[in-house]
Image (cartoon, rainbow, N blue to C red):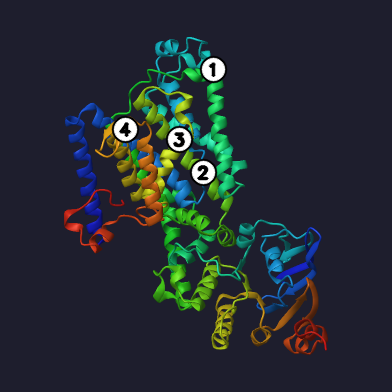
Amino acid sequence: MKLETRGATMRFGGLTAVSDLNIGIEAGEIVGLIGPNGAGKTTAFNMITGVYAPTEGGIFLDGKAITGSKPHHITKAGIARTFQNIRLFPTMSVLENVLVGCAVRERPNWFASTLRLPGYRRRAKESRAFALELLEATGLASVADEPATSLPYGKQRRLEIARALATKPSVLLLDEPAAGMNPQESVELLEFIKRVRDRFDLTILLIEHHMQVVMGVCSRMYVLDYGVTIAAGTPDQIRKDPKVIEAYLGVE
Amino acid sequence: MKARNSILTAVAVAAAAGLLALADKNLGGFAMRILNLSAIYIVLALSLNLLNGFTGLFSLGYSGFMAVGAYVSALLTMSPEVKEMNFFLEPLAPWLQNFNLPFLVAIPIAGLCAAAVGLVIAAPVLRLRDDYLAIATLGFSEIIRVLITNAQRLTNGAQGLKNIPKNSTTWVVWGAAALAVLFMALITRSSYGRTMKAVRDDEIAAEAMGVNVFRVKVVSFTASSFMAGVGGALLGHMITTIDPKMFTFMLTFNVLLIVVLGGNGSITGSVLSAIAVTILMEAMRFLDGPLNLVFFKTDGLPGLRMVVFSLMLMIVVIFRQRGLMGDKELSWDRLAKAGLLPRGKKGGAA
């Protein structure tokens, strides 16, 4: 198992946002996490990435417990994410945004940075080359020096993915990558996600709202409703699952 | 382009040094003092800008660190006789009585002491954000001031210290200002500086990118405290008298005014604004005295100067919300674009 949650539960006071979440993802898989609004998908992401420490249960990366670690430790361990409501660094250029992602491997310290010591110079140069390579791979090389927030929506989403890739992750979590996109853009994005997975040797867990989007790209998926996992399986199984139909369409 | 910029920077630095030497020879004591004061304010403004403009930490506890620096370096450099003269109510703690260090050694020690205090305060305070952080730092700065007021045998309490050696010469203060500019230019353009800006822009995203947000904040807070300590020490050695009342919130406000006017996150903005504000503060002193503007007569309204300053601040905030320079720098490339290059202008980023 590349990434695994065992009985992960998150309570906020009396509200159980996610209960007993058991996800297991093999290396190289693309797995979907779906469910209606407020089902606890993003909370699940926040538990995995360390924004919240789960009230109960554990999170495991390559079999090692990362439960309750700080977000930056989890990023260093190899889990990177994007955000549902894009969170680029607004005062920075496209390239600089990606360079921030590189910092976790570059590990600059203030002293060597200020004095431009040789070790710092070499690593900074490597980071720059890697960042440019990522921009090339994500089709953003031509806008490298533009302000990040001046990009059109779809490219901002791709930039978020490029920035996440800059941390050299083995697992990538995508929070509603196709949100706000039209069907044409969504299809392109799915192709893009598959390419990224193959090229960077990734395992991907993605949250998606639209069933169609997710069905096309995921080999398996988990369905949450009110924090409870109501179904898990291949897209075909999910499509026919009465509970899922009920959660999405209501019962007659 | 790069070569041209380096040459221009070298020329500008040399020209500034030459002008300074000329001013030092020809200007009167008062004018020179104001010029030197603006150098100290450059150090102070840059240090607050590192915190406020580049790391997004809104601190109002700035003057406390200046006080630490000022007191440490004053106590380290005063001769035993002067100390005896100062401490007439209660004698100075014996271990400090005969402590006497050269000025240029005392200044970095003053900075390090302020940095140490900053480091201690950072741990609890930096768990807070925004206005909560501002209030907490303000509180700590008052605590420092109260401690200084009451540590009679260490600081001479409310009497303050007099006859501090007058060591803040033109070259010392402008040297410190140049070092501060250099430090800021280097750190903000490095990978580390980028992580600071990431924390400022979006803490949650920075954390998700693997930036150790708390650590970055602590480093920035400590470095800023160091510079504040150095600035405070230089100020003490210029005025030659310090007392706890000097380091109230008003002093923080003055530095904050410079940073906001110059532009949060702009090094050149802070430099230009420090010089402009310091000179204007003195040039507008006539406003506090009797005025006769035909339709408006006063016989001296102390504080009118600050009213005018507040108005200026309001105007800047209304029309240029991000300060005169925003978070941009005045660079050679920018000047060239504006067609101003042949004439050259002081203050280009290094």
Place of residue B210 in the rendered image (x, y in percent of width and height, measured from the top left): 57, 59
Which chain is disc 3 placed on? B
Residue A29 image-quadrant placement: bottom right
Amino acid under label 3?
Met
Q: Amino acid at mark 4?
A: Thr
Q: Residue at x 16, y 31 (%)?
A: B26
Question: What residue did someone put label 3 on?
Answer: B250
Query: Which amino acid, mark 2?
Result: Ser
SS of the residue at dot 2?
A: loop
Chain letter of the residue carrying label 1: B
Chain designation of label 2:
B
Front position in the image: A127 or A23:
A23
Query: Amino acid type of disc 1?
Result: Gln
Q: Residue at x 59, y 46 (%)?
A: B132
Q: Which mark's residue is nearer the viewer, 2 or 4?
A: 4
Q: Disc 1 designates what residue?
A: B152
Q: Secondary structure at mark 1?
A: helix
Q: Are marks 4 and 1 on the same chain?
A: yes
**Residue B16 in the figure: left or right of residue B37:** left
Residue to which mark 2 is pinned = B59
Task: Residue A2 in the image: state x and y as whole percent.
Answer: 70, 71
Compare residues A60 and A21 and report the one nearer the observer.
A21
The tag earlier along the polypeptide, 1 or 2, is: 2
- Mark 4 or 1, nearer chain start: 1
Which percent across, then down, holds residue A124? Answer: 44, 59
Q: Give me the C-alpha separation between circle 2 and circle 3.
A: 14 Å
Q: Is residue B326 left or right of residue B215?
A: left
Residue A200 occupies quadrant: bottom right
How far is the residue under mark 4 from the one under mark 1? 43 Å
- Say whether residue B49 is left or right of residue B173: right
Mark 3, Cα crowd under 10 Å, few <14 / some 14-19 / many 20+, is few
